[in-house]
Image: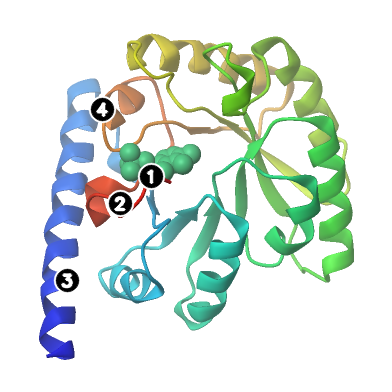
Amino acid sequence: MQTSGSADRRAQLAGNLQRVHDRISTACADVGRDPGEITLVVVTKTFPASDVALLADLGVTDVGENRDQEAAAKAQACADLRLRWHFVGQLQTNKARSVVAYADLVHSVDRGRLVTALDQATARSGRTTRLGVLVQVNLDGVPDRGGAEPGEVGALADQIAASDQLDLGGVMAVAPLGSEPARAFAELARTANRVRHDHPGAIAISAGMSADLEAAVAAGATHLRVGSGVLGRRPSSG
Ligand SMILES: *Cc1c(COP(=O)(O)O)cnc(C)c1O
């Protein structure tokens, strides 16, 4: 029974993954981009480590999580799968030490205190690689949803670039609820250009989720964070 359940789930994930890859290919073709420039991060929050293992077997290389406790346990359970782990959720400074133990790229850096905490935690962790980070940009003016105000992004980028242990990868945003994603992603692209002007290596733009990945590809996204489009509807909000 268990085997057939897992075979069904594998087939379901394989079909969903194929549909998402087809959407990315079509979106790239529409704007003349190479799909090879785009990293698909499959956001596995609320889904079990067994799904992560199936995804790895289906060729997924990058997975994302938004809560440290859940991510730490899953990363440990999946340590032999050689995946890259992306932390995409709001992050408290007291979780920095835990996150640097498994994360390859933290997408949600939005304040100076968090830069300091991640830098110190990385130094103490015994990691052999620097920690990649993106500056999360708030595009809707509602501070509770996370992200630095566009006007604060330059100073945060400078702080990260000057840190010992962090690599400034670029910027990230979540499109505001109830507004046109294309407009939000265009603003993110302008912010990304300003950051790249000062820090030429900061080329990543993390934008686009299941509902709006086409708009993100059109606006130059390099990282798409897709959850429900691959895994199905989440059991709870998260
Ligand atoms: C959950 C989540 C996603 C994935 O959202 P879907 O709509 O399920 O694709 C992407 N980014 C962040 C920051 C998330 O928390």
Residue type highlighted by circle 2: Arg
Q: Give residue 119's mark.
A: none
- Residue 18: percent from the left, percent from the top? 15, 54
Q: Residue at x 72, y 27 (%)?
A: 199
Q: Earlier in the sequence, mark 3 or mark 1?
A: 3
Residue type highlighted by circle 3: Arg
SS class of the residue under badge 3? helix
SS class of the residue under badge 2? loop
- Residue 80: percent from the left, percent from the top? 49, 83
In this view of the protein, which residue sits in the foreground, 38 or 15? 15
Q: Which of marks 4 and 1 is in front?
A: 1
Number of numbered discs present? 4
Quarter of the view holding residue 128: bottom right
- Residue 137: percent from the left, percent from the top? 60, 23
Does the beta carbon at disc 2 come under 8 Å from ligand 1?
Answer: yes
Q: Do callouts 2 and 1 mark residues in contact (Cβ within 8 Å)?
A: yes
What separation in Å lies between label 2 and label 1 (alpha carbons)? 7 Å
In this view of the protein, which residue sits in the foreground, 80 or 142? 142
Quarter of the view holding residue 88: top right
Residue, disc 3 = 9
Counting other residues with Cα less than 10 Å from the Cα at mark 2, is it few (<14), some (14-19), or many (20 or more)? few
SS class of the residue under badge 4? helix
Residue, disc 2 = 234
Q: Which of marks 4 and 3 is in front?
A: 3
Q: Nearer the viewer, mark 3 or mark 1?
A: 1
Residue, disc 1 = 237
Quarter of the rendered image showing ligand 1: top left
Residue, disc 4 = 214
- Residue 204: percent from the left, percent from the top? 54, 35
